[in-house]
Amino acid sequence: MNPVRVRALIVALLGLGAFLAATQLGYSEDPKPAAARAYKPVQPIHEMMEGQKKLFGEIKDGLLDKQWNKASQSAWILAEVANANSYQNEAADYQAWAAKMAQDCVTLAQNLKKKDEAGAKELITKVGQTCQACHDKYQK
């Protein structure tokens, strides 16, 4: 092998080594997950509950009027509001009721999308019962 090619090969290998070393700086096998952002409500609980009540009414009205898409959209929004509501109180039962309501509203939205009137009515009753159980303990 001629000396020029040997030097070129050495320079190329050194360059490759430098590149690999530079790209591995700070690399970790177990990257740490970013810290979760703290939830900060933008409105007091009373206003949130009034919003939930409005959405619940829209769902019931949409079902009665056979406005399936409108009712389904309101159910999806109510599911997300219930999800956010779980951050309003640290008590385990409060959070469990909010999570149950959120999940029932997801199922309700899916039933409304399928125009499953009987299933939607059953879930509306379940959501109402969950609200009432929580209100019996926490509403002032």
Image: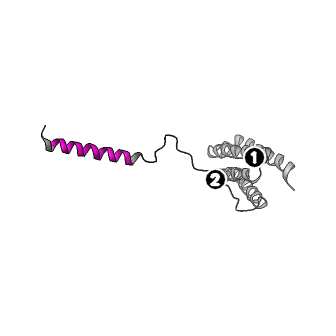
Q: Amino acid at mark 1?
A: Gln
Instruction: Give the residue at mark 1.
Output: 95
| Residue pictured at 27% horizontal, 42% vertical | 13
Pointer 2 or 1: first along the chain:
2
**Which element carries disc 2, helix, strand or loop?**
helix
Specify the quadrant of the image occupied by residue 92.
top right
In the figure, 54 relative to 5: above or below? below
| Residue nearest the observer in this picture, 59 or 85 | 85
Foreground label between 2 and 1: 1
Q: Which quadrant would the N terminus be assigned to in this image?
A: top left
Element type at mark 1: helix
Q: Position of residue 68 (x, y in %)?
A: 64, 50
Determine the image quadrant of residue 97: top right
Within 10 Å of the Cα at label 1, are there few (<14), some (14-19), or many (20+) other Cα atoms?
many
Instruction: Please give the name of the residue rendered at 86% of the width and 48% of the height, measured from the top-left corner.
Output: 137
- Outermost left residue: 2
Magenta stretch contains residue 20: yes
Dominant secondary structure of the residues highlighted in magenta in the image: helix
Q: Contact, CB < 8 Å: mark 2 with mark 1?
A: no
Residue stretch rendered in magenta on the structure: 5-22
| Magenta highlight on residue 13 | yes
Q: Which residue is at a point 62% across and 46% down the rendered structure image?
A: 113
Residue type pointed to by label 2: Gln
Image location (x, y in percent) of residue 48: 74, 58
> What residue did someone put label 2 on?
73
Q: Position of residue 30 (x, y in %)?
A: 52, 41
